[in-house]
Amino acid sequence: MKECNVRQNAKRCNCSWEPCDRKGLCCECLQYHWSHRELPACLFPDAVEKTYDRSLRAFIQLYKDKC
């Protein structure tokens, strides 16, 4: 199994929630958000991510016409 590259992941992470301790730990981030029926910040543009609405509804609304 390939090891997680936390430093490289953290550089690309657009999560603006400052006390987040999962930055760079994508598998933990995804598991956390999915348990709350959300998606992680990296699946949203920065302007939308900053609203902290990471719901499935927000994701679908954002991308529904882009396919």
Image (tube, grey):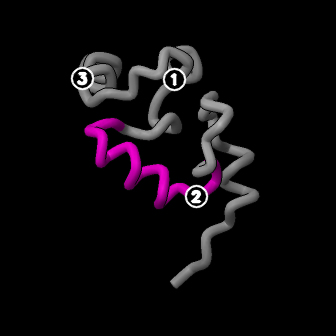
Q: Which residue is mark 3?
A: 57
Mark 2 vs mark 3: which is more N-terminal? 2
| Count of marks, rendered view | 3
**Which residue position is annotated with label 2?**
25
Kind of residue at badge 1: Glu
Write down the region rendered in magenta.
23-38
Q: In this orientation, does residue 39 appear?
A: yes
Q: Is residue 7 magenta?
A: no
Q: Residue at x 49, y 15 (%)?
A: 51
SS at circle 2: loop
Which secondary structure, mark 1? helix
Residue found 31% across the figure and 46% down from its top: 34
- Amino acid type, residue under disc 3 in the picture: Arg
User: In the image, residue 16 lies at what x, y percent?
Assistant: 63, 28
| Predominant SS along the magenta part | helix
At horizontal 64% and vertical 42% (from top left) the residue drawn is 13
* First in residue order: circle 2 vs circle 1: 2
Mark sitting earlier along the chain (1/3): 1
List the residue tagged with mark 1: 49
Residue in the foreground of this view, choosing between 60 and 6:
6
Give the residue furthest to the bottom: 1
Badge 2 local density, few (<14 within 10 Å), some, or many (20+)?
some
Tell me the quarter of the image containing the C terminus.
top left
Position of residue 6 relative to residue 11, above or below, is: below
* Marks 2 and 1, how far apart at CA: 18 Å
Q: Is residue 54 left or right of residue 15?
A: left
